[in-house]
Image: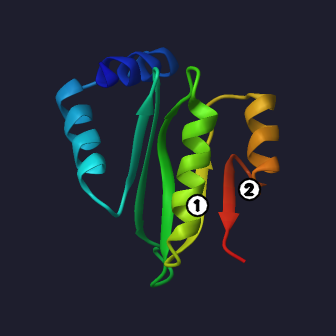
Amino acid sequence: MVVEIVSSKIEALFPSIRIDKAVLSQSLREIKSSSQHFYREKNGSVLAATTDNMPFSTRKQCSLSVWIGEGDGVILFRQWMTWVRSRKAIRLATVTLMFDDPRADRFLLRSGFRRLGGVYVWERG
């Protein structure tokens, strides 16, 4: 079900890209199975984020990979940020919006992110 939801949203954004559901399913399984990553789904909403070393530091960065907020997206986002804040090694959290949405922009800015071009960045102070 989640693979169907995510693939339909991606196809709507990028009609020229053929979604390989097996690859998507494997990617989501890998995110779910690792304590280094974050994955939640609730009532049609999905949030998946991956954590890795920054290319310029030994510290970690957590990047939101999938955020489909049909209903409970804000709840999942807040759970993700609680998770990020609880991991001291994570110094940056990033969100890239693939669409213009003033509500999402305001929400991210109110949530402590700053906009750098098309990317929203939260930095541990």
Q: Is residue 44 above or below residue 76?
A: above
Among the 4 quarters of the image, the one containing residue 69 = top right
- Within-10-Å neighbours for mark 1: few <14, some 14–19, many 20+: many
In the displayed structure, does residue 40 sit left or right of residue 88?
left
Q: Residue at x 75, y 51 (%)?
A: 111
Q: Which mark is residue 113?
A: 2
Q: Residue at x 27, y 58 (%)?
A: 34
Q: Residue at x 74, y 56 (%)?
A: 113
How far apart marks 1 and 2 lie (CA) works out to 8 Å
Comparing 29 with 94, the one in front is 29
The mark nearer the N terminus, 1 or 2, is: 1
Among the 4 quarters of the image, the one containing residue 71 = top right
Regarding residue 18, the answer to whether it shows in the image is no
Comparing 18 with 112, the one in front is 112
What amino acid is found at the position of numbered circle 1 in the picture?
Ala
Regarding residue 99, the answer to whether it shows in the image is yes
Q: Is residue 50 above or below residue 12?
A: below
